[in-house]
Image: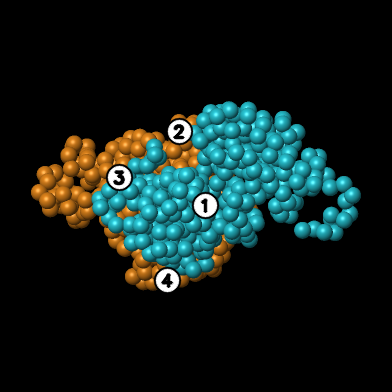
Chain colours: A cyan, B orange
Amino acid sequence: MGKSKKKKKDKREENYLVGIDLGGTKVLAAVISAEGEVLATAKAATPVADGAEAVMDCMAAATEKAIDKAGAKRSDVLCAGVGAPGPLDPVSGIVHYAPNLHWNDVHLGTGLSKRLNIPVSVHNDVDAGTYGEFRLGAAKGARDVVGIFPGTGIGGGIILDGRLRTGFRGSAGEVGHMVIHADGPLQQGGNRGSAEAVCSRPAIVRDIRAALDGGRASIIMELVEARAESDKSERITSGVLAAAAEAQDGLVLEVLGRAGYYLGLLAANMVNALDPEIIVFGGGLIEACGKWLMPTIRTVAWQYYINKRNADLIRIVTAELGDYAGVLGAAMLARDRLSE
Amino acid sequence: MGKSKKKKKDKREENYLVGIDLGGTKVLAAVISAEGEVLATAKAATPVADGAEAVMDCMAAATEKAIDKAGAKRSDVLCAGVGAPGPLDPVSGIVHYAPNLHWNDVHLGTGLSKRLNIPVSVHNDVDAGTYGEFRLGAAKGARDVVGIFPGTGIGGGIILDGRLRTGFRGSAGEVGHMVIHADGPLQQGGNRGSAEAVCSRPAIVRDIRAALDGGRASIIMELVEARAESDKSERITSGVLAAAAEAQDGLVLEVLGRAGYYLGLLAANMVNALDPEIIVFGGGLIEACGKWLMPTIRTVAWQYYINKRNADLIRIVTAELGDYAGVLGAAMLARDRLSE
């Protein structure tokens, strides 16, 4: 952090950035220094049922709260970047379709900009996460980066020559919808045989449930029930998968191994197509189960690189910034947009 | 082109470009105007058995011949671009590995530059073909282009923001080696289940032969034999496939339909990952059988686009420049390199 610069200024105006991560269950707002340090955050439950205006009010309120917590004023903030579920148009700031939020063509950029009275730019949430890792996390210093974030879906982000690729219609990076297993299974309305259909968390859970239905032994439902008493859910979460794998559950290790194989194919596909320096794997499933997934991902990807020359220079790493990747990346993208 | 500059010159020096396509069977050299018009060409059989020095001598001789035919002098030529089989390093001009030529680490750029005494840049042949279509052919005016060239293999080229993507190690665009059918068939040492393994010409021929071995009726071997008398080959070429399809051969129509489906998945994968404006399909198989392949490619791709918004703006077209795409693209890339 530039300390000399800080000392020179008696007012800190326009020294701060705001990053906001808009999810279907929560909003995370962060105040970030010019150097990319998270100074303060505020969270709120996303009031999905109250509609888009209420969600934008909530985002603005969380932002105000984070600014307060940082001991700053709104006039200290240069701009805000939002990571939102897509498809969306990063130029107009319109979120075209976000099923989790029940949104259709919501003018998020202008709506939030009016509320906060600062420039707001809107980006795909996984693009923002990848950009955060690129600027401040696991991919710092690289120029060509692919981010892959398996979870409920499999989001992706592509950075080439240091610039986020948004594509002709703003929807580049949808790597989870690429078909890697033609004629394979279907999952939740996505593409048959896509990465999401074979190695997202719901695909893993589907395969485990099918095996249980077929009579396979596993401790996983005991783990689900033990957790359900405390957190009232009854789901096979990434945390439950990790606990089962830690306990050497044969079924879970098998299904995670298969998911790692598919994620490795996806990584190799991106290397064969784009030849990046680094692939960053992040998101909930990797945070919980990376210990079992990453070794398989790396060895499968290597086997499928068509060009093995200098292939050891290509790094396949796990994300470093966790929940902060999205807010940091969105803030950096907003500032870059402003300076263009 | 700067016309005022042209008027000032009484000699036409450095007004011409040279493009050279280096294949395993033939060399094609072309003299090209600054505006991208092919003025003269010369062909020669590639003397593979005589080694790399002989091949470079042959390329230089074909170039001299084309310059002569164009009524030009070597001093009229600004630079030469070569499209060569990869993997190669476009920065150093070294061809690392070209099995068709029996080449390992051949210094093609410097070797040819010494012979011709002009700057030579070396590019992947399919990259050059894609760039040719981008600058002067089917993708003219677009900024984000993916080229897919099915034939013996399936080559690819990726242009984003008007710039050819070569990647971290110079091997971007290997779309034929992307896995689209995990655990699918293996073909010629490539990746199991890759596009090459399911929809290249050898994959199509393999599937037809397997069906014939299984007792399926088809006129294709009659067509092969009828042609063999005249051209002494006995192969299921793209031309033979087209003749069988034209004659409504059930087996060939089925296998081409299946190949179109896989090529459509590959196109959709590129759209979901990169969201380009246009995908150009070219190469021998498409030239001969595009009539049967392209409709399936287009409808399958559409079905697998995850973002359907404005998806009708994405064009999937056939290449326009045929054999000239490579020499034109290589020449344009060489000039761009020089002006960087």
Mark 3 element type: loop
For the view shown, which residue lies furthest in the front direction? A229
Q: Amino acid at mark 1?
A: Gly
Q: Amino acid at mark 2?
A: Lys
Question: Which mark is in front, 1 or 3?
Answer: 1
Residue at 33%, 53% in the rendered image: B182
Mark 3 lies on residue: A183
Between the residue at mark 4 and the residue at mark 1, the CA separation in whole angstroms equals: 42 Å
Residue B332 in view, yes or no: no
Q: In the image, A323: left or right of B271?
A: right
Residue A278 vs residue A199, the one in the foreground = A199
Between the residue at mark 2 and the residue at mark 3, the CA separation in whole angstroms equals: 21 Å
Mark 1 lies on residue: A283
Tell me the chain of label 3: A
Residue A133 vs residue A146, the one in the foreground = A133
Pointers 2 and 3 within a single chain: no
Q: Which mark is residue B308?
A: 2
* First of labels 1, 3 by sequence position: 3
Tell me the chain of label 2: B
Q: Are marks 2 and 4 in contact (CB under 8 Å)?
A: no
Pointers 1 and 3 within a single chain: yes
Residue at 82%, 59% in the rendered image: A3
Crowdedness of circle 3 by 10 Å Cα count: few (<14), some, many (20+)?
Answer: some
Between the residue at mark 1 and the residue at mark 2, the CA separation in whole angstroms equals: 26 Å
- Find residue B311 and report its horizontal and vertical position in percent: 46, 33
Tell me the chain of label 4: B
Between the residue at mark 1 and the residue at mark 3, the CA separation in whole angstroms equals: 27 Å
